[in-house]
Amino acid sequence: MTGADRPGRLSRLLVANRGEIACRVMRSARALGLSTVAVHSEADAGSMHVAIADHAVAIGPAAAAQSYLDMDRVLAAAQGSQADAVHPGYGFLAENAAFARAVEAAGLVWVGPSPQSIDDMGDKERARALARAAGVPVLPGSDRFAPGVPLDAVGAAAEAVGYPLLVKAAAGGGGIGMRRVDEPAALAAAVESTQALAQRAFGDGAVYLERYVARARHVEVQVFGFGDGRAVHLHERDCSVQRRFQKVVEESPAPGLAIDRRDAMCEAAAALARAQHYRGAGTVEFVVDADGGEFYFLEMNTRIQVEHPVTEMNTGLDLVSMQLRLAAGESPAPARQVDVRPQGHAIEVRLYAERPARGFLPATGTLARFDLPAPTDDLRVDCGVRAGDAITHWYDPMIAKVIAHGATREAAIDRLLEALSAIVVEGVETNLAFLRRVIGHPAFRAGAVHTGFIDEHRAALLAP
């Protein structure tokens, strides 16, 4: 593209992230004619996202707290490299309202929702209240409890919410710090451990309680808002197959979900985005009663999701390109709901360096060999590492995302299995064999997915 084709006033984009998502954002930025700036820690000096960027800036040691999470260093890198916009990716500073405000105060373009939206949805108690006000069903839950609140007050709230319940970090997300409690005797320990973890992970030890739905499904809706009260939904993704409250498989459309439930859920998500004058890409997450099909608001993630390629494969849209154009003052298509036309079925799995048989503990090592299938119209592989790269304990151990598309769910499953069979990883233990077993399991093929799927089929999925 020529300079005249670039979105609005943007010309140079700093990606405040690393690995797979940094590489993915840079691909869309480059397609729009933008030059790209990578930031990197000492551990990432030779990494893939640094190699493909037009410019790179070192921002500190390996520890994320002193590099990728250091707002001052990242902002200084943006200013020093003469970037005019910052895209945060997901994780790290992506949902940090203070960082978004600092970027805007420095005269740079923040590629994301408004800091106010990040604040509103980042506070889980406030988000639940806003969802209720927008007419979105919400699970029974409690107010937030800061560290030091008497446990008898928490116990009284737990009785009102009802057991089983979840203790959740008020400032959290991604399943981090979540604890299930089945009886009053286990409540105190769960609250104390969640508060401690939340303080370390988010700098906020407050927690809240929420009713736990057994054999639930986790279904989320991709939304895109234009910041002026308009918003569209890009349909749903089923993320029910999880380990330790973190997603393993994501697919769209959600298998076996009644059309009226799907439509109501998608419209509820769009209504919340419209009510908040939400700007850009976001995801509204729901828990769905696997028996009755009733759905309840969980949270809203104010960023691009790990699993956004599922939606892109189904709709033909580029969500990052849409983010960039909107941030530059344009109105990216589709602006009307009738113009969103998903086709077929898409499924994504996350390839991790981890030990499934040992509780999915992260694994480390050097990728002595790393062979991936070539991308095609019905297969996408998003990756941020190459053969010879090290998987360290410093960062998330995700190696790649593999996304297959088919005219039907069965066709997408077969294409994904074919792709997984072509992947070769040596030097680091991974969950590759586990993923093949999940996707090929008869219950998964039948669409019998729920959040306890892995535990229910543990013997078959985790056999030696």
Image (spheres, rainbow, N blue to C red):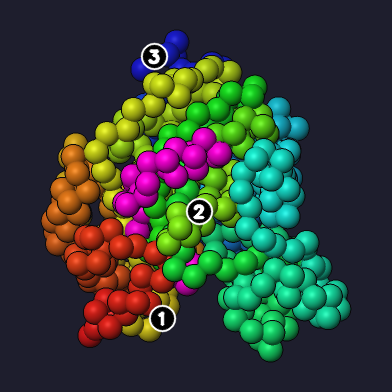
Question: x, y percentage for residue 238?
Answer: 39, 52
Residue, disc 1: 359
Q: Nearer the viewer, residue 307 or 14?
A: 307
Q: CA distance from mark 3 to mark 2?
A: 50 Å
The reply to whether the magenta stretch includes residue 265 is: yes
Circles 3 and 1: CB distance less than 8 Å?
A: no
Q: Is residue 197 above or below residue 101?
A: below
As drawn, which residue projects farthest toward the bottom? 185
Q: Where residue 294 is drawn, which disc sits there?
A: 2
The first of marks 3 and 1 along the sequence is: 3
The reply to whether the magenta stretch includes residue 13 is: no
Q: Amino acid at mark 2?
A: Glu
Q: Could you say whether the residue bearing mark 1 is in a helix, strand or loop?
A: loop
Question: x, y percentage for residue 255?
Answer: 31, 51
Question: x, y percentage for residue 262?
Answer: 42, 42
Q: How many marks?
A: 3
Residue, disc 3: 2
Circles 3 and 2: CB distance less than 8 Å?
A: no
Residue 96 seen anywhere in this rendered image of the structure = no
Magenta stretch bounds: 243-269
Q: CA distance from mark 3 to mark 1?
A: 50 Å
